[in-house]
Image: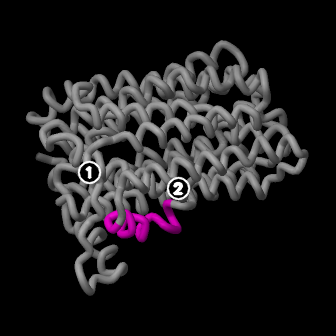
Amino acid sequence: MWRLPDFRRLWAGDTVSQAGTAVTVLALPLVAIGPLGASPFGTGLLVMCEYLGFLLLGLPAGAWVDRMRRRRVMVVTDLVRALLLASLPVAAWCGVLTLPQLYAVAFGMSVCTAFFDIAYQSHLPGLVAADRLLAANVALESTRTVTAAGGPGAGGALIAAVGAPLALVADAVSFLASALLLSRIRRPDPRPERRPGTRLRAEIGEGLRFVFRTPVLRALTLTAAVSNLCGTVGASMLLVLLAGEGEGGLGLSPFLCGLVFTAEAAGGFLGSLLTARVAARLGGRFGEGRVVMCGSVVVSGVLWLLALPFFQADWRFAVAVALQGLGWTAFMPFKIGSVALRQRLVPEPLLGRVTATFRFVVWGCMPLGALLGALLGQYAGVRTALWAGALGELLAVLPLALSPRSRR
């Protein structure tokens, strides 16, 4: 894969961006919890804003991307995200940083990410041959998780040294570097042909119908949606548990908080390396749906569930971190395999809309999960929200278990 210059540029741009984003994963919630004193509900609202763009604009974004030059979409959204993040340390230096600004930046980032991710996944099949899509996705996911593995730990140390608002400068710079690298892709990026008389609503409908009339795509989409909905219920409260000083909080340092995300990324990296081997050895025997079901729901869900009692401010924390990482190892065959399968099954003119449909359903569930987690964390307790999310994730097995393809 590294012999393909345009793929290398796409890979490099994404890797640089992901490295900076690993800092923001910690920095945004820690700004809310620390300097701004957000409650569990307020922190959950921030997580909701981080995904709200997919719910509000996910479907039309796909149709719009299918009308635009995809590389240009990626470059522009990188630049906008850099500006949004840069506004936070500037406001902090001026002493005017507030929670509403934090929410606005998080929402703006989610809108840009919705457009970027759709364009990114739709542009990839034009850079590599169809029979190399799985290898390309494995390569991209592997390097993403390598940068994410070191990023949160380094980010935690950086936040401890200079403060969370200033640490966001690193992510702003990473988006600028990503835009530069993506702009150097040499493959032509023509504007897609517009079919005369086609309306936006009709184009959105095409993407929806293709996903929900294709059994395997429907099952994958619903499985991911249930997993993300319930997963975000707990994820929205995880940093409140780890960094919070109030009732139920562990009061851990930013560095120790970062170790949880580092373990998740390291586990994801190991899982991405195993994905191709798992697909080759088990896919033909049990069918792709069976491999996905086992990898994404049964093993990963149980491991995440087992980790929860061990999140304590003593030696048990190390056990929780290890189980959290192993859960992501088990989850990667679903995450990578579903993307590659979708890219193979969907005709090129529909890729943007189908990707947008998937993102709308799957990522659109995340702000709803974050809101539910915020309410549970505020009124029932942070640990209650984490248990509810982990137990609910096990239900994600149902769409794949009931799909005819998963039983082959």
Residue 112's disc is: 2
Q: Position of residue 302 (x, y in %)?
A: 43, 33
Residue drawn at the location 62% of the way across and 57% of the way down: 107
Residue drawn at the location 82% of the way across and 47% of the way down: 91
Amino acid type indicated by mark 1: Pro
Name the chief secondary structure element in magenta. helix
Q: How crowded is mark 1: few (under 14 residues within 10 Å), some or many (20 or more)?
A: few
Q: How many labels does the image show?
A: 2
Residue 131 drawn above or below residue 144 = below
Residue drawn at the location 44% of the way across and 23% of the way down: 146
Answer left or right for 248 relative to 309: right
Between circles 2 and 1, the one closer to the viewer is 1
Residue 292 drawn above or below residue 23 = below
Confirm whether the magenta stretch covers residue 187.
no
Residue drawn at the location 73% of the way across and 52% of the way down: 102
Q: In which quarter of the image is residue 183?
A: top left
Q: Where is residue 195 in the image (x, y as percent from the top left)?
A: 23, 78
Residue 188's disc is: 1
**What range is drawn magenta here?**
54-67
Give the spatial CA distance, label 2 vs label 1: 23 Å
Of residue 301 and residue 157, the one placed in the foreground of this image is 157
Q: Position of residue 359 (x, y in %)?
A: 40, 57
Answer left or right for 198 relative to 299: left
